[in-house]
Image: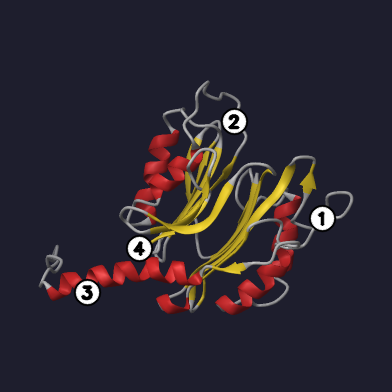
Amino acid sequence: MCILALQYQIAKDAPILVAHNREEALDRPSQPPRIQSGRPRVVCPVDRKAGGTWLGVNQHGLFVAVGNRPKRNVPLEPISRGILCRKLLGFTNARDAAQYAVEELSTGQYMGANYICADANFAAVVYGGDEVRLVELPPGLHILTNGDINDPNDSRQEFVRRLLTLQRLDSAVAFLAVASRTFARRCDANGKWGVVFTRGNFGTVSSTLLSLTKKTHHSILQYSAGPPDQVPYEDYSALLRQVLSSDRAARAQMAKKGVTCPPQTSGA
C-alpha cells in the first residue's frame, strides 16, 4: 500500500506535481533514485528484491507509478508489478503506456495493482484488480491509495486532500512546500491524522517529491530514504534534469541532421 498525490495541469509552471510515500516491509531492500542504463533514459529508485521500481520519470517527461490494489483471484506465480512499471517507462507518452498497462493486466498474470501514467498532455489511472479499467484524469488534484482514485470514503485520501487544499498551490514551489510537510506528518496513536506510519514490520519506507516543469532546468526530484519525519529529503534534481535534457539533446541532434516530422495533410 502506498499513498500518492498528483496535482495535474494546475500550476502554470509545472503540469505534473507529485508527492508519494511508499509503504512496504521495513526490511525490503531498495536503492535511491539513479539513472538507469538503456533508452529512453530513466531516473527511478529500484526495488532490489524484484528489480523493478514503484515510480520513475523518463526523458520524454513521462511519469509512471504503481501501488498495490486488492484482488480476489491472484496468480500462483505473478509477474512483478515493479518490472511492469519499468516497462511502462520505456514508452514515449502516457497514453500508450496506460494502454499497454491495460493489455498486460488483462492477462491476469499480476497481483492487484494501480498504475498512474502522466505526461504534460495526458494522465490516467489504470485499475488492475478484479476488473481492469482505465480512467483518464482531468486537470486537478488526484489522490490514490490502494483503492479507487479520489475516493470520498477513504479517510487517508480525504486527510491529505484537506491539507493540500487549505491554500492555493498554483506553483511548484508552493505545492512542494506544503506536500513535504503533509507527507512527513506521522499518524497519531490511533493511526489517524497523519500519513507516515509504522505497524510492526510494515510502514512508510521512503518518500518522493517531484515537479516536472515546462523549463527542464527548474524540475525537482527530492527523495527521503526512510520515513520523511525522521529521514530528511535529499535532492536528486540534477539526475532528473540530466534525464529530461536527453530528449532535448536528441531533438537538437535530429534537427542538426535535417530530420523532421512529415508535414500533416489537411482532411478538407
Specify whether 39 is left or right of 120: left
- Numbered tag placed on residue 221 in the rendering: none
The CA distance from mark 4 to mark 2 is 32 Å
Q: Which residue is mark 1?
A: 187
Residue at image x 44%, y 41%? 84
Given the image, on which type of amino acid does mark 1 rest? Cys
Q: Nearer the viewer, mark 4 or mark 2?
A: 4
Quadrant housing the N terminus: top right
The CA distance from mark 4 to mark 1 is 37 Å
Element on which disc 3 rests = helix
Q: Which residue is mark 4?
A: 60
Q: Which residue is mark 2?
A: 71
Above or below, 236 against 99 in this view is below
Given the image, on which type of amino acid does mark 3 rest? Ala
> x, y percentage for residue 70?
62, 34
Q: Which residue is mark 3?
A: 252
The CA distance from mark 3 to mark 1 is 49 Å
Q: Residues within 10 Å of mark 1 (few under 14, many from 20)?
A: some
The CA distance from mark 3 to mark 4 is 14 Å
Given the image, on which type of amino acid does mark 4 rest? His
The disc, 2 or 3, on the residue closer to the chain's N-terminal end is 2
